[in-house]
């Protein structure tokens, strides 16, 4: 299917083959369910916070193309003192999950992190396969349940890198250089 390249990219040998394949399959099924690309990166490189954001944004575009519908969850497993997880969204995912300042009243990305972080080790704690597996499972559940709410109406998001606005016109995602009229 078109979601064959979705799944988990792991820089850390946490899972045996069977566990890994099962989680990979879960991420792929979630992508098909929400009809968006989904990728989880289990990252061990030590980047700054902005370095992680840049890596995830560019990695997404390399994997799935610019302005496609989907997201990447970068899980910082570098063991650094202040771990930094990041979700990079593109296309329709920007409108469904959204993480922009003009939208503080209903920040769905924060909700996802709240749900996932319950399972993950705190910064500096040992990284256990079961915890990471539970976190990824929770991520998939959250993506599916939030997607059922659909994109927010009368909402736009702004992509500062490309200087473009994304918004819905009917059911279609519009990409424009100008703000929507509302």
Image (spheres, grey):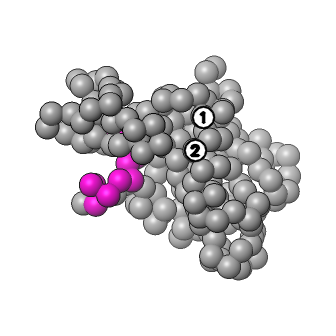
Q: Is residue 100 above or below residue 80?
A: above
The magenta stretch spans residue 96: yes
User: Would you say 164 lies left or right of 48 here?
Assistant: left
Q: Residue furthest left?
A: 182
**Mark 1–mark 2 CB contact (< 8 Å):** yes
Q: Residue at x 63, y 57 (%)?
A: 52
Q: Is residue 3 above or below residue 99?
A: above
* Most foreground residue, 169 or 35: 169
Q: Position of residue 65 (x, y in %)?
A: 58, 28
The magenta stretch spans residue 153: no
Q: Quadrant of residue 66?
A: top right
Q: Quadrant of the C terminus?
A: top left
Q: Secondary structure at mark 1?
A: helix
Residue pointed to by mark 1: 61
User: Would you say 51 lies left or right of 34 here?
Assistant: right
Q: Residue at x 38, y 48 (%)?
A: 98
């Amino acid at each position: 299917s078109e979601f064959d390249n979705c799944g988990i990219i792991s820089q850390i040998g946490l899972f045996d083959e069977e566990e890994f394949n099962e989680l990979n399959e879960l991420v792929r099924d979630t992508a098909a369910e929400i009809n968006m690309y989904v990728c989880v990166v289990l990252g061990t490189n030590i980047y700054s916070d902005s370095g992680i954001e840049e890596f995830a944004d560019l990695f997404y575009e390399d994997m799935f193309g610019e302005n496609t519908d989907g997201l990447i969850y970068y899980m910082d497993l570098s063991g650094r003192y202040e771990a930094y997880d990041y979700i990079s969204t593109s296309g329709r995912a920007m409108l469904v999950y959204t993480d922009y300042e003009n939208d503080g009243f209903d920040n769905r990305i924060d909700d996802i992190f709240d749900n996932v972080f319950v399972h993950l080790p705190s910064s500096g704690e040992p990284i256990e396969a079961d915890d990471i597996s539970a976190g990824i499972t929770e991520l998939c559940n959250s993506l599916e349940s939030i997607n059922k709410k659909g994109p927010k109406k009368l909402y736009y998001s702004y992509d500062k890198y490309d200087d473009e606005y994304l918004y819905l016109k009917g059911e279609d995602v519009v990409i424009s250089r100008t703000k929507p009229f509302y």
